Image (tube, grey):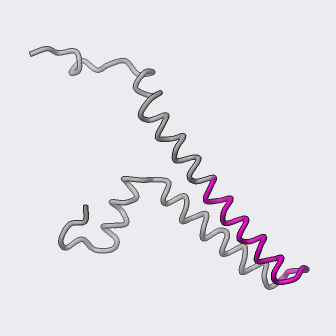
Amino acid sequence: MAQYGESASDKFVRKAKESPFMIVGLVGLMGVVGAGIYGFKNRQIKTSVYLIHMRVAAQGSLVLCLTAGICFNIYKEHIAPKLSPPSIEDNKKD
């Protein structure tokens, strides 16, 4: 939940901690856009075909980030707790 007085950079840092694959997705987006700008200048194919290729690359990076995020959350919530032994505090009884 957004808090009063939270700047854009504070909100970005908070969101990055909540979902680290957001950063990976933004970097992927910047990579696709950068490659698209560079490739648009040096293309050998028609513009419409080039734009379709860029759209497919952008969608592929999105699917890759979503898949990696889901795998990370499954590991963090279901697999990692079973691999690590319970801590001493968890075994204490009041």
Percent from the top left, x then y, of residue 50? 81, 77
Percent from the top left, x then y, of residue 19? 42, 53
Q: Residue furthest right?
A: 44
In this rendering, would 46 be left or right of 9?
Answer: right
> Which quarter of the rendering shows the C terminus?
top left
Percent from the top left, x then y, of residue 45? 89, 79
Residue drawn 63% across the image and 52% down it? 64
Q: Is residue 29 above or below residue 50?
A: above
Q: Toward which corner of the image does residue 61 lie, by quadrant?
A: bottom right
- The answer to which of 54 and 11 lies nearer the viewer is 54
Q: Is residue 74 above or below residue 63?
A: above
Give the residues drawn in magenta, as a range. 42-63
In this rendering, would 9 be left or right of 93?
Answer: right
User: Which secondary structure type mostly characterizes the magenta part of the structure?
Assistant: helix
Q: Toward which corner of the image does residue 39 lie, by quadrant?
A: bottom right
Q: Toward which corner of the image does residue 89 lie, by quadrant?
A: top left
The answer to whether residue 74 is magenta is: no
- The answer to which of 30 and 79 lies nearer the viewer is 79
Q: Is residue 89 above or below residue 67?
A: above
Q: Is residue 24 above or below residue 86?
A: below
Residue drawn 51% across the image and 41% down it? 72
Percent from the top left, x then y, of residue 31? 65, 68
The answer to whether residue 46 is magenta is: yes
In this rendering, would 44 be left or right of 51?
Answer: right
Residue drawn 61% across the image and 63% down it? 28
> Which quarter of the rendering shows the N terminus?
bottom left
In this rendering, would 90 be left or right of 65?
Answer: left
